[in-house]
């Protein structure tokens, strides 16, 4: 009888665990923490054939489509895997004028995935894509200098099968089969340029021939005329090219657009942009605007009088060729006043007479509509490399910026109202994050400080005082009102981030800080000296920065010290594969133990509420854990790789925090959760929500107040989060109670082993029959093909349990 009870108990537990696991894997909602923009939108691309259809491309955050029904942007590249992270750098977008549902994107970042480059092709507005790998032919760099120029990629307006793309290092290419295959046009004797932006733009004249294909092709090259010609023309669809002379002699082309009369409007600057650079003679402080007439080969300088700075964006009213708008790029002139000081950025000019007279729309009065995103106040429109009319309402224009997109709803108004048009776009680079028990979510990010969120669906207040890029945030686990954030300065808060006080520290900037569990000691490892030199020392203070003392026994660059969450005397740091421990609140460190491998993450995670619990992600070598403060480590079975690890609130009935990883389990890579100390793992994201992995911040953190909610850093998609549906949270808690119930089965009449065996055989045959007739699950599901096997295992266990109960 005891054997039967054990079988029944085990099968019941297996049934519950299987169904709970399946529930987790398929019932997560994914989104990004609401911050609002925060990164460089390189270009906005309006459809000229379908109203309200706009696309936006970013340098590190992927691409977006405007959803007019919901009045927000929708991300199109969240499916990008870690092996495709470079696809979040979108170099160019091209729309098919004959089919508004079709679009193409040139994607790739040179420093990710070996520079893997692709043409992404969609027939359904970007809901799905076909990936065409072109890495062996040409490479893109969506985060390179000149990324706001363009467009490099274009669809022939007369023939949807024909596309052209310029490249940075490999010249001009053409496709005659809708982007599937590409051939280099060697007739254009240009490969790369000194600034490595290569070809800035390709423009086709739609009126060049009403027939099989556009014949007139114009190409702008990102170099000074002293280096080589920078404007070319082909009259035979790329079979041959000639140099077009007559343009400015000391500038390089940025963008070009045809007006309805067939004239070409071109912006110029003395650099690739969006800002100047010191390693090239490209200060990005001069520019012009020109009009070129291909019909009579006439050049006209139409630069706004009295303004000689670099120009970037250009757009022309499709109904009025005299109505042109241009923007400067990389210029810092006064825009408006705010409580945070004056905002300095680019200028926007409008003409109604083809460029004879211009109006500066910024100097004419600037009114900011922040759209309830308060942090943008005090920040300017800058790096304005792309400006576009709404083709269906030319009172509206859209201009890109280093912090998002701005929309002017009436360019004739005085003053023009500039709306921060970024709802749905989250392009910050998160660098650190804490979820405080019974408190808020506190983040630090690149460029724009960070936020304190009590509701991740609503825009939050930025940290004030501001200091730009911030690299670390920490709180005292047993006194969580105390928080410290790090950037070019150090600030502490005694009221959970509501107000901040500056600390004194003269020896370094950025880096990483940690508060001991009681909040009485702050340890700090600077990232560098203020003049960007390496620092091998770490420091501690017990008086909020009034005095600092060098930590003994820890000489290393970029130390990431972590505090034990229970014992305020204990801290941990990883030096190579050596686990260093302090037992005197950071005064000194000694080696405690050794990790199995040395190439893991420097970021150690201390288990919340468990003294001595230390876990370390070891990249391709798996996941290690210690329960004795690092004296001994064991590898967690089943985890073959782990890039990031974090903890969150425990599942109901569990005495150990939920463990989250970005890693590889059973040959699947993604976000996994374990509610049983790492014994079993469930994947909780799917192939549509990969975000390129944990990116620069390389963190994954569970919410300490809500079980099942997890946050992850990205390379430029902000902080993404997954939330377990409330019904599934109850399912998780019921799994625990089911375990308890099934493990205490009351006495029942004995059933012969032969009857049990016969019953199990019958159930096994039934499940086998189901398996034979079932189609495999597509790769887009959370668990891939293994989900179907999991379902069958669950059914097998369930039927076994039922049959045994009846026999009992």
Image (cartoon, helix red, strand yellow):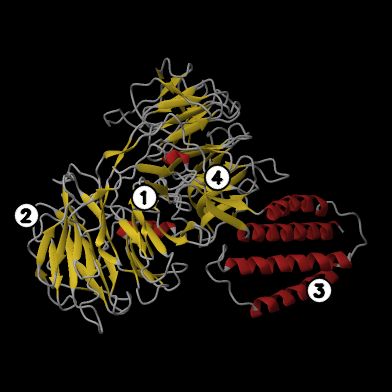
- In space, the residues marked 2 and 1 are separated at their CA atoms by 42 Å
- State which quarter of the image contains the N terminus: bottom right
Residue at image mark 2: 226
Measured as percent of width and height from the top left, residue 363 is found at 28, 42
* Dot label at residue 413: 1
Quarter of the image for residue 529 reads top left
Measured as percent of width and height from the top left, residue 462 is found at 47, 36
Circles 4 and 2: CB atoms closer than 8 Å: no
Q: Give the vertical position of 747 relative to 614 (above or below).
A: below
Q: Give the vertical position of 563 relative to 225 (above or below).
A: above
Along the polypeptide, which appears first: circle 3 or circle 2? Answer: 2
Q: Give the vertical position of 414 relative to 97 (above or below).
A: above
Residue 146 visible, this angle: no
Q: Nearer the viewer, mark 3 or mark 2?
A: 2
* CA neighbours of label 4 inside 10 A, class few (<14), some (14 to 19), many (20+): some
* CA neighbours of label 3 inside 10 A, class few (<14), some (14 to 19), many (20+): few
Q: Give the vertical position of 485 relative to 731 (above or below).
A: above
Residue 510 visible, this angle: yes
SS assignment at label 2: loop
Q: Nearer the viewer, mark 3 or mark 1?
A: 1
Q: Residue at x 36, y 77 (%)?
A: 98
- In space, the residues marked 1 and 4 are separated at their CA atoms by 31 Å
SS assignment at label 4: loop
Q: Residue at x 20, y 48 (%)?
A: 310
* CA neighbours of label 2 inside 10 A, class few (<14), some (14 to 19), many (20+): few
* Dot label at residue 758: 3
Along the polypeptide, which appears first: circle 1 or circle 4? Answer: 1
Residue at image mark 4: 458
């Amino acid at each position: 009888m005891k054997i039967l009870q054990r079988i029944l108990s085990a099968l019941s537990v297996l049934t519950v665990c299987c169904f709970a696991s399946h529930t987790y894997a398929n019932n997560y909602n994914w989104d990004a923490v609401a911050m609002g923009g925060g990164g460089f939108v390189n270009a906005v691309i309006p459809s000229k054939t379908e109203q309200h259809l706009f696309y936006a491309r970013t340098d590190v955050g992927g691409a977006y489509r405007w959803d007019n029904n919901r009045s927000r942007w929708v991300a199109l590249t969240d499916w990008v895997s870690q092996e495709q992270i470079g696809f979040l750098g979108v170099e160019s977008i091209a729309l098919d004028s004959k089919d508004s549902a079709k679009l193409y994107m040139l994607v790739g970042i040179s420093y990710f995935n070996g520079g893997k480059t692709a043409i992404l092709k969609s027939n359904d507005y970007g809901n799905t894509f076909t990936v065409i790998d072109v890495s062996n032919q040409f490479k893109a760099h969506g985060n390179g200098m000149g990324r706001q120029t363009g467009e490099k990629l274009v669809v022939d307006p007369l023939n949807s099968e024909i596309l052209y793309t310029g490249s940075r290092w490999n010249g001009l290419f053409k496709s005659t089969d809708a982007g599937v295959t590409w051939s280099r046009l060697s007739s254009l004797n240009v490969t790369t340029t000194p600034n490595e932006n290569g070809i800035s733009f390709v423009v086709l004249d739609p009126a060049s021939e009403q027939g099989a294909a556009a014949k007139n092709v114009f190409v702008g090259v990102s170099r000074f005329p002293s280096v080589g010609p920078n404007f070319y023309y082909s009259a035979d669809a790329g079979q041959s090219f000639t140099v077009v002379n007559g343009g400015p002699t000391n500038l390089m082309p940025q963008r070009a657009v045809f007006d309805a009369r067939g004239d070409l409007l071109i912006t110029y600057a003395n650099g690739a942009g969006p800002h100047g650079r010191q390693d090239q003679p490209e200060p990005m402080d001069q520019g012009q605007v020109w009009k070129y007439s291909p019909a009579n080969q006439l050049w006209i300088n139409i630069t706004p009088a009295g303004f000689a700075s670099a120009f970037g964006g250009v757009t022309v009213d499709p109904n009025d060729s005299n109505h042109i708008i241009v923007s400067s790029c990389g210029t810092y002139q006064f825009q408006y006043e705010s409580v945070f000081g004056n905002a300095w950025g680019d200028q926007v000019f409008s003409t109604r007479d083809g460029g004879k007279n211009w109006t500066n729309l910024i100097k004419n009065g600037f009114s900011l509509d922040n759209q309830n995103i308060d942090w943008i106040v005090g920040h300017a429109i800058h790096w304005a490399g792309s400006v576009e009319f709404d083709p269906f309402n030319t009172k509206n224009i859209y201009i890109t910026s280093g912090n998002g997109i701005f929309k002017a709803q009436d360019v004739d108004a005085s003053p023009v109202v500039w709306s921060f048009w970024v709802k749905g776009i989250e392009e910050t680079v998160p660098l650190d994050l804490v979820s405080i028990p019974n408190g808020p979510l506190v983040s630090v990010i690149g460029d724009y400080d960070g936020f304190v969120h009590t509701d991740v669906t609503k825009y939050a207040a930025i940290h004030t005082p501001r200091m730009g890029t911030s690299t670390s945030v920490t709180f005292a686990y047993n006194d969580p009102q105390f928080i410290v954030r790090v950037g070019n300065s150090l600030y502490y808060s005694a009221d959970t981030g509501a107000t901040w006080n500056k600390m004194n520290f003269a020896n370094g900037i950025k880096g990483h800080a940690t508060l001991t569990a009681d909040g009485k000691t702050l340890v700090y490892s600077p990232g560098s000296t203020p003049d960007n030199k390496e620092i091998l020392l770490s420091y501690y203070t017990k008086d909020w920065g009034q005095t600092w003392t060098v930590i003994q026994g820890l000489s290393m660059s970029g130390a990431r010290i972590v505090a034990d969450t229970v014992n305020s005397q204990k801290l941990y740091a990883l030096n190579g594969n050596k686990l260093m421990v302090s037992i005197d609140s950071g005064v000194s460190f000694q080696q405690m133990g050794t990790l199995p491998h040395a190439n893991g993450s420097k970021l150690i995670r201390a288990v919340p509420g468990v003294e001595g619990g230390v876990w370390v992600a070891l990249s391709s070598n798996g996941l290690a854990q210690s329960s004795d403060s690092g004296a001994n480590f064991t590898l967690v079975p089943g985890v073959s790789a782990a890039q990031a690890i974090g903890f969150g609130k425990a599942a109901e009935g569990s005495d150990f925090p939920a463990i989250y990883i970005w890693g590889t389990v059973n040959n699947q890579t993604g976000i996994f959760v374990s509610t049983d100390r790492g014994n079993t793992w469930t994947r909780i994201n799917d192939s549509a929500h990969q975000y390129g992995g944990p990116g620069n911040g390389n963190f994954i953190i569970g919410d300490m107040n809500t079980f099942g909610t997890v946050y992850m850093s990205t390379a430029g998609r902000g902080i993404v989060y997954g939330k377990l549906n409330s019904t599934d949270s109850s399912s998780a808690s019921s799994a625990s109670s089911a375990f308890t119930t099934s493990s205490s089965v009351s006495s029942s009449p004995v059933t012969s082993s032969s009857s049990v065996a016969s019953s199990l055989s019958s159930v096994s045959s039934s499940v086998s029959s189901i398996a034979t007739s079932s189609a495999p699950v597509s790769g887009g599901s959370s668990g891939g093909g293994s989900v179907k096997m999991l379902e069958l295992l669950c059914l097998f266990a369930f039927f076994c349990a039922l049959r045994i109960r009846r026999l009992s």
